[in-house]
Amino acid sequence: MKIIIDNVTSKEVIALLEDHLHSMTLHSPPESIHALDVEGLRKPEVTFWSVWEDAEVTGCGALKELDTKHGEIKSMKTSPNHLRKGVARKLLVHIIQEAKNRGYSRLSLETGSMDAFLPAKKLYESLGFQYCGPFSNYEEDPNSVFMTLDLEHSSY
């Protein structure tokens, strides 16, 4: 697997992101969907990565800078053909390391509260993320859960 910084222009990556946004609509009401679209992922405060195996995209994810000490994980998605192969874990460890390299002290995320999001929550928990309240511009929402990782005390 190869992780690269991506400018979000290839048809393969855009198709994976469209699948990500579509799957959000299947499990969350519109007011509870906080996934970034392609244009949102191209903003200067966002670094986007894609994961490749040969010529096939296997996953993607992004890191959004909230401030000089706090980052947010966005758009984590594994291709349906590559589930349970370690793609998300490898990318998440990469993003955590990048956040540490930037000097962030905290890395946070929002994900769905429904059963469909259980594998993602278990992955985040396995890497030390703890449940927390809303951060940044988020508000309490029964369809969302919020998690954070203290990077100053993380082993990753």
Image (cartoon, rainbow, N blue to C red):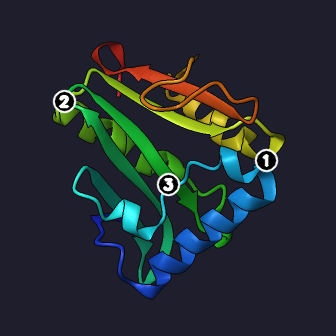
Q: Position of residue 61 (x, y in %)?
A: 44, 55
Whole-angstrom CA distance, mark 2 to mark 1, is 32 Å
Q: Which type of secondary structure does the marked residue at label 3 adopt? A: strand
Residue drawn at the location 25% of the way across and 49% of the way down:
45
Position of 11 with respect to 19 (left or right) is: left
Q: Which type of secondary structure does the marked residue at label 1 adopt? A: helix
The residue beneath circle 1 is 116
Residue drawn at the location 71% of the way across and 53% of the way down:
30
Q: Residue 119, relative to residue 127: is it above or below?
A: below
Q: Which type of secondary structure does the marked residue at label 2 adopt? A: loop
Tally the numbered discs. Answer: 3
Q: Residue 30, relative to residue 128: is it above or below?
A: below
Whole-angstrom CA distance, mark 2 to mark 3, is 20 Å
Residues 130 and 28: in front is: 28
User: Which mark, residue 68?
Assistant: 2
Going from the N terminus, do you reach mark 2 or mark 1 first? 2
Badge 3 amino acid? Ser
Badge 1 amino acid? Ala
The residue beneath circle 3 is 75
Screen quadrant of the N terminus? bottom left
Q: Position of residue 28 (x, y in %)?
A: 75, 49
User: Which mark, residue 85?
Assistant: none
